[in-house]
């Protein structure tokens, strides 16, 4: 609760102060992660190898990759946050794509190194690693000995930095939807600091309620896995829709800038990359409670469709207003 309230205040005061806090926390977290990885590798240096990178060791082949897809997708969700900050970014058309590319490459390297060092710490025993709730934390704690508190400090600062980034980005997405009429117009209001206070309160309040309900369950890690899997389905659908919409948009509105590689080939590859993992999440025969997730997502989509139809009737020019405000225009 304290984290949510503090982050809400920082984001309310402005993007500069909140981002500064996020950068400091992330830098501290990264330092502790590097220390933890070095400790794991040093304590098991006699087992250094590249077995973890051999694709033949993936259990159940493509099915195994599909099973791990929710985790992989969720780890990269935050890299798209710069897109929501275009109105508060200098030279947004250049800076935002650069930030997304750099973040994607950087976190990919960090995740791979974390996974590899964890594998080394447990001597590549997949069954042992699979039985752990948080393998990296367990491996680092074992290797750091009396300094294992560093691992938990890294988790604490990571949570804080991630919450700042998510709050900044999501509150501005809701703000844009409110300002353009997709959501109630009152959500498009800003504070004296130029921050979207109405959507900030809405997002933070919802996050606080979810956090309290989640914490009351008593099994945080189990609940995180369930919620993460449920959330992956609509996120994958959104990513697919965005990939499909990209070539349509460029052919209709920006034909002179259309690129067969960037605006058609890459989106097609993106859709194809999502098909198999998505099917793995919604196919019949899932164990409980995962078997009801497709129905839940379908219900949410139907509610969204009904809301969209109602909103279009109240705001006839909605299709022209959505996305009409460009950062540098």
Image: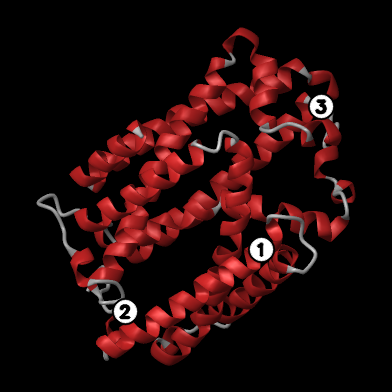
Q: Is residue 101 visible from the viewing direction of this image? A: yes
How far apart are the alpha carbons under marks 1 and 2? 33 Å
> In percent of the image, x 53 and y 79: which residue is there?
263
Gap in angstroms between the C-alphas marked 3 and 2: 53 Å
Q: Which mark sits nearer the N-terminus, 1 or 3?
A: 3
Q: Residues within 10 Å of mark 1 (few under 14, many from 20)?
A: some
Q: Residue at x 50, y 79 (%)?
A: 246
Vertical comparison of 208 with 236: above or below: above
Q: Where's residue 160, x and y in %?
A: 40, 35
Q: Nearer the viewer, mark 3 or mark 2?
A: 2
Q: Within the image, what quadrant is residue 97 found in? A: bottom left
Q: As drawn, is 228 to the left or to the right of 165?
A: right
Q: Residues within 10 Å of mark 3 (few under 14, many from 20)?
A: some
| Placement of the C terminus among the 4 image quadrants | bottom left
Q: Which residue is mark 2?
A: 322
Q: What is the secondary structure assignment of the residue under circle 3? A: loop
- Residue 214 lies, in percent from the top left, at 50, 42
Q: Is residue 83 above or below residue 107?
A: below
Secondary structure, mark 2, is: loop
- Dot 3 corresponds to which residue? 48
Apparent side of residue 43 relative to residue 190 in the rendered image (left or right)? right
Q: Which residue is mark 1?
A: 292
């Amino acid at each position: 609760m304290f984290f949510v309230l503090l982050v809400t205040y920082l984001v309310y005061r402005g993007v500069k102060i909140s981002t500064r806090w996020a950068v400091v926390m992330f830098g501290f977290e990264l330092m502790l992660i590097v220390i933890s990885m070095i400790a794991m590798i040093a304590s098991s240096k006699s087992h250094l190898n590249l077995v973890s990178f051999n694709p033949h060791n993936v259990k159940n082949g493509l099915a195994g990759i599909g099973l791990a897809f929710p985790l992989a997708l969720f780890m990269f969700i935050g890299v798209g946050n710069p897109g929501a900050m275009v109105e508060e970014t200098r030279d947004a058309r250049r800076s935002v794509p650069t930030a997304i590319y750099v973040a994607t490459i950087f976190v990919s390297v960090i995740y791979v190194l974390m996974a590899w060092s964890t594998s080394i710490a447990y001597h590549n025993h997949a069954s042992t690693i699979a039985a752990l709730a948080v393998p990296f934390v367990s491996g680092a704690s074992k290797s750091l000995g009396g300094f294992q508190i560093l691992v938990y400090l890294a988790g604490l600062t990571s949570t804080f930095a991630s919450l700042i980034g998510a709050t900044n980005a999501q509150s501005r997405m809701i703000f844009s939807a409110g300002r353009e009429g997709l959501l109630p117009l009152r959500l498009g209001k800003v504070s004296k600091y130029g921050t979207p206070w109405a959507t900030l309160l809405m997002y933070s309040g919802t996050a606080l309620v979810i956090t309290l309900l989640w914490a009351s369950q008593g099994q945080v890690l189990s609940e995180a896995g369930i919620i993460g899997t449920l959330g992956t389905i609509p996120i994958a659908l959104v990513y697919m829709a965005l990939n499909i919409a990209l070539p349509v948009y460029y052919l209709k509105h920006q034909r002179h800038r259309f690129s067969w590689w960037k605006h058609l080939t890459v989106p097609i590859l993106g859709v194809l990359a999502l098909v198999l993992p998505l099917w793995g999440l919604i196919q019949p025969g899932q164990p409980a409670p995962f078997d009801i997730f497709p129905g839940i997502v379908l219900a949410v989509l139907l509610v969204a469709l009904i809301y969209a139809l109602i909103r279009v009737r109240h705001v006839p020019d909605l299709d022209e207003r959505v996305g009409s405000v460009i950062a540098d225009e």
